[in-house]
């Protein structure tokens, strides 16, 4: 069905354009895509999962580092760690929900304003769009032709006007509550990684130092996985993304450890 529609659409094009399309298809089929940049991953909730996960690991591991520097017990680490994890997870989830909901509401309001402008000041709106295309380098005759075609389709004209002003139309399929839920779940799942060491190693050792080292290893592994995911999503170099992600976590943990050690040993505060 899709092939029939594509062939039907192609038959309406200029013969020269059709020849160019066929050449592009042959080039693609022959593997002439070695210099083509990698496409980013377009997962619907990729952003929520990635940033919630990164924030959760860094936040939880930094807390563990601070507590460990203060020489508190493993029980203290688990109680404070999970309490902080749930509280921050709820905060992150609600924050993502409110942010996504606000963006959608603003986009819907801007679209309503644009629809009114197109309906009541159509000539002015078409002139602005014409000038926008000219500013982008389009010939005045071609720009006028494009605008005149868009003017036949009110929805398309509204969409182009919003895009010309750097505004995206609201995504009707987007559910802000899903974004918030995914963010909350991702925060809990990834934030648990640094704490697992203090749970898994309970039958094997009572040493808080060993458990802390285990937390360091698990946090590094989790950050590495998220660094790889970040590179996949953004189409970046994997090694660079992993190094930056690990450095971010290490810097935050070192700062937290230094603060905890300072308060314990210099300021004379007992945990």
Image: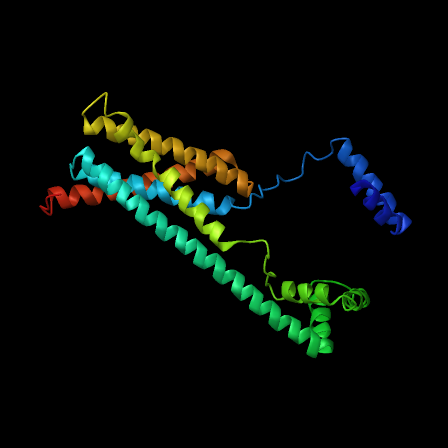
Quadrant in the picture for residue 121: bottom right
Rendered view: 57 above or below 14: above
Quadrant in the picture for residue 171: bottom right
- Colour option used: rainbow
Of residue 247 and residue 216, the one placed in the foreground of this image is 216
Q: Is residue 257 visible?
A: no
Residue drawn at 58 percent across, 44 percent down:
42
Residue drawn at 77 percent across, 69 percent down:
151
Left or right, 234 with respect to 134, comes to left
Residue 259 place in picture, x, y as percent: 21, 45
Rendered view: 244 above or below 114: above
Residue 44 place in picture, x, y as percent: 55, 46
Residue 206 place in picture, x, y as percent: 18, 25
Rendered view: 211 above or below 63: above
Of residue 213 and residue 6, the one placed in the foreground of this image is 6
Residue 60 place in picture, x, y as percent: 30, 41
């Amino acid at each position: 069905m899709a092939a029939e529609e594509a062939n039907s659409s192609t038959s309406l094009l200029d013969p020269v354009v059709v020849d160019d399309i066929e050449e592009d298809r042959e080039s693609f089929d022959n593997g002439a895509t070695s210099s083509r940049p990698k496409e980013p991953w377009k997962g619907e909730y990729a952003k929520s999962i990635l940033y919630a996960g990164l924030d959760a690991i860094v936040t939880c591991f930094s807390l563990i580092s601070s507590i460990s520097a203060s020489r508190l017990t493993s029980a203290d680490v688990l109680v404070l760690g999970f309490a902080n994890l749930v509280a921050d997870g709820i905060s992150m989830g609600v924050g993502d929900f409110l942010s996504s909901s606000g963006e959608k509401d603003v986009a819907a309001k801007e679209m309503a304003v644009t629809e009114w402008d197109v309906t009541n000041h159509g000539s002015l709106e078409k002139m602005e769009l014409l000038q926008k295309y000219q500013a982008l380098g389009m010939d005045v005759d071609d720009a006028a032709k494009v605008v005149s075609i868009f003017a036949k389709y009110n929805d398309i004209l509204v969409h182009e006007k919003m895009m010309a002003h750097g505004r995206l139309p609201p995504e009707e399929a987007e559910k802000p509550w899903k974004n918030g839920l995914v963010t909350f779940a991702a925060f809990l799942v990834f934030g648990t990684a640094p704490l697992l060491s203090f749970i898994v190693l309970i039958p094997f050792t009572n040493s808080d130092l060993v458990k802390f080292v285990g937390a360091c290893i698990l946090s590094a592994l989790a950050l590495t996985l998220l660094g790889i995911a970040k590179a996949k999503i953004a189409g970046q170099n994997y090694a660079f993304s992993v190094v930056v992600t690990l450095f971010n976590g290490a810097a935050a943990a070192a700062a937290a450890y230094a603060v905890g050690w300072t308060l314990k040993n210099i300021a004379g505060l007992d945990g």
